[in-house]
Amino acid sequence: MRLFVALTLPEAVRDRLASLTLRIPGLRWVPPENYHLTLRFIGEVPAFQCEEVDLALAAIRARPFDLALAGLGVFEKQGRVQSLHALAERSPALSHLQAKIETALQRAGLPPERRRFTPHVTLARCEGAPVEKLAAFLQAQALFRTEPVPMEHFVLFSSRLGKEQAVYTPEVEYALAA
């Protein structure tokens, strides 16, 4: 199974993100039902290790917290824009949860994540979008932000790559408790 751990977003936040959709050639927008904030991408896992991942995540104890999105950005690779995203405001509670997930997954036998955690929600994949149009869009949305919303659980998702979009299936939900 191809797995990842994420925070789901309430419908009001997904609707707000979807309202940013604009026709820009070369941008492939993520459907609102796929919006999430990845806490840890796991990747392909053999069936026997799925149970270990579940047990490791179920043992995590962390408090609920509020999450707000503020600003838009892009990820680049070798000077080319790969994706457009909304940034999550960093908070000690978000960083704490992500670190606990990373530690738990390493204890379950997964290799450490190599990339630095950058909390974000992917909005679009870029396939040759004109840089000037992308820059104008980012500038027009410079003050984008959402109201803080409560995060009371995190989710283990499976992912199946499709022709148009990936299909994400929530497998297990883990409660955050005080």
Image (cartoon, grey):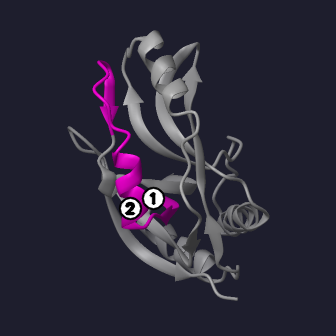
Q: Amino acid at mark 2?
A: Ser
Is 126 placed above or below 32 here? above
Residue 157 is marked as: none
Along the line of sight, the residue nearer the viewer: 56 or 15: 15
Q: CA distance from mark 1 to mark 2?
A: 4 Å
Please tell me in which quadrant of the rendered image residue 78 appears: top right
The residue that mark 2 highlights is: 158
Whether residue 1 appears in this view of the structure is no
| Outermost residue, left side | 163
Residue 92 position, x and y percent, is 79, 63
Q: Earlier in the sequence, mark 1 or mark 2?
A: 1
Q: Secondary structure at mark 1?
A: strand
Q: At 66% across and 45% down in the image, what residue appears?
A: 118
The region drawn magenta spans: 1-29
Along the line of sight, the residue nearer the viewer: 88 or 116: 88
Residue 3 is marked as: 1
Quarter of the image where the N terminus is located:
bottom left
Residue 72 position, x and y percent, is 55, 37
Is 92 placed above or below 81 here? below
Indicate whether residue 2 is drawn in magenta.
yes
Q: At 70% across and 51% down in the image, what residue appears?
A: 112
Is 78 placed above or below 112 here? above
Residues tagged 1 and 2 counted as in contact (Cβ below 8 A): yes
How many dots with numbers? 2
For label 2, count other residues whose C-alpha is less than 10 Å away and answer few (under 14), some (14-19) or many (20+).
some
Is residue 12 toward the left or the right of residue 110 in the image? left
Q: At 61% across and 82% down in the image, what residue appears?
A: 176
Please tell me in which quadrant of the rendered image residue 162 appears: top left
